[in-house]
Image (cartoon, helix red, strand yellow):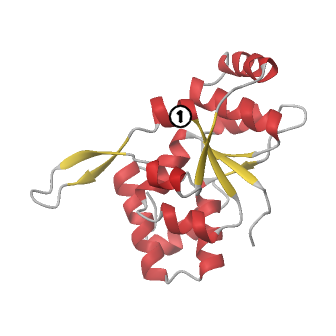
Amino acid sequence: MTRRFDSIILDASCLLNLYATGHLREIAIALPNQFWVADYVAEREALFVCCRSRTDGKEVREPVDLSSFTEEGLIQLMRLEEPVEEATFVALAAELDDGEAVTGALAFHRGCAVATDDRKARRVLGQLSPPVELVSTLEILKWWAEESRIPRGVLSAALAEMQSNASYIPGVRHPLYEWWRSVVGRSGS
């Protein structure tokens, strides 16, 4: 069941993971959450996914193009605007990379959840007062699968694309690791 967050800000890795599935549009349409990305992340961090060339099978970098998503309102860009947001960004940047820090600062001050798989970011953002709500790539994908009743073959292919194009494999301690493993049909990483 989908946890109800009005807004979720995707960090760079989560955005790249979802983009790499080839189903980001369907995910954004299916879920009731508004997806956001910090302008810093969109412009400086989430720039490419890797994929296999259809002609020679070599790995190539595919640019991440969010323009159609933003034009359709499926993903909106957010930027630091207030001095208090900037101050929180600076404080968080002492512990996190700039993309996670700006994402966390925006979420903290605007009451959004953060989609991240980074353990340190989850720990730091979870220790703020009040803590930032956190979701993971796999939670979003599981919500999408449940909300849209995605056929297992389509879901398995999407997870395989994410693994191949964004190099994402969840850790064995991830709460949805067994779900992921059952969908991709593997006994481990």
Tell me which corner region of the image, top left, top right, bottom left or bottom right, holds residue 37: top right
Q: Would residue 169 be seen by someone viewing this image from the given angle?
A: no
**Amino acid type at mark 1:** Val
From this viewpoint, which residue is outermost toward the left? 56
Q: Residue at x 53, y 80 (%)?
A: 150
Residue 38 place in picture, x, y as percent: 60, 36
Residue occupied by mark 1: 41
Q: Quadrant of the C terminus?
A: bottom left
Q: Residue at x 71, y 21 (%)?
A: 89
Q: Would residue 88 be seen by someone viewing this image from the given angle?
A: yes
What is the tally of numbered marks visible in this picture? 1
Q: Quadrant of the N terminus?
A: bottom right
Q: Secondary structure at mark 1?
A: helix
Relative to residue 36, is residue 161 depicted above or below? Answer: below
Residue 25 place in picture, x, y as percent: 50, 63
Residue 27 place in picture, x, y as percent: 56, 66
